[in-house]
């Protein structure tokens, strides 16, 4: 089981996208995870510009902004209960014995 999943809300903790003055502004949902390269694509962060040629799929062409990737080690999951970036732990719950992720700050289940 992985600590980060697609759809988790994460906060950028380090790197060019990190904000010291207001860290809550650098939050977003994970759109894609590349496990081999250890990079994540976060909605609305690390926007890069791509020059697109006119094609039948995109008749406009021009300069398009797309989300780039951020190193996996530079993001942390944000707990929905305590609204803080947190480390993630695992525990088995219920009679089925499935692993569940939980917040190490407030002990709330993440999923």
Image (cartoon, rainbow, N blue to C red):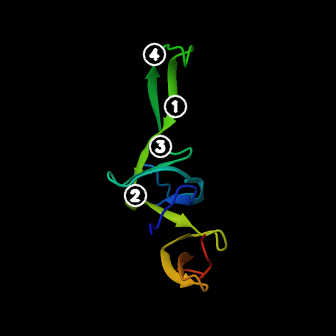
Q: How crowded is mark 4: few (under 14 residues within 10 Å), some or many (20 or more)?
A: few
Q: Which of marks 2 and 4 is nearer the N terminus?
A: 4
Sequence-wise, the earlier of marks 1 and 4 is 4
What label does residue 46 carry, if any?
3
Residue named by callout 1:
65
Across and down, in percent, residue 15 comes to: 39, 53
Q: Which residue in the structure is indicated by mark 2?
A: 72
Quarter of the rendering occupied by the N terminus: bottom left
Give the answer, above or below, for where 95 lies relative to 9.
below
How far is the residue under mark 1 from the one under mark 4?
Answer: 14 Å
| Number of marks present in the image shown | 4
- SS of the residue under disc 3: loop
Label 1 or label 4, whichever lies nearer to me, is 4
Q: How far apart are marks 1 and 2 (CA)?
A: 21 Å
Mark 3–mark 2 Cα distance, whole angstroms, equals 13 Å
Going 40% across and 58% down the picture, which residue do you hit?
72
Residue found at the far front of this picture = 96
Mark 4 to mark 3 CA distance (whole Å): 22 Å
Q: What element carries label 1?
A: strand
Q: Where is residue 47 in the image (x, y as percent from the top left)?
A: 49, 38
Give SS at disc 2. Answer: helix
CA gap between label 1 and label 3 equals 10 Å
Which comes sooner in the sequence, label 3 or label 2? 3
Q: Where is residue 14 in the image (x, y as percent from the top left)?
A: 41, 58
Q: Which residue is drawn at 52% across and 45% down?
A: 45
The C terminus - image quarter? bottom right
């Amino acid at each position: 089981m992985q600590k980060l999943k697609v759809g988790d809300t994460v906060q950028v903790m380090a790197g060019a996208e990190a904000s010291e003055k207001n860290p809550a502004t650098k939050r977003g949902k994970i759109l894609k995870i590349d496990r081999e390269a250890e990079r994540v694509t976060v909605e609305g962060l690390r926007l890069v510009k791509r020059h697109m040629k006119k094609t039948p799929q995109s008749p406009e062409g021009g300069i398009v902004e797309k989300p780039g990737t951020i190193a996996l080690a530079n993001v942390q999951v944000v707990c929905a209960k305590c609204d803080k970036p947190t480390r993630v732990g695992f525990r088995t719950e219920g009679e089925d014995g499935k692993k569940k992720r939980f917040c190490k700050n407030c002990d709330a289940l993440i999923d």
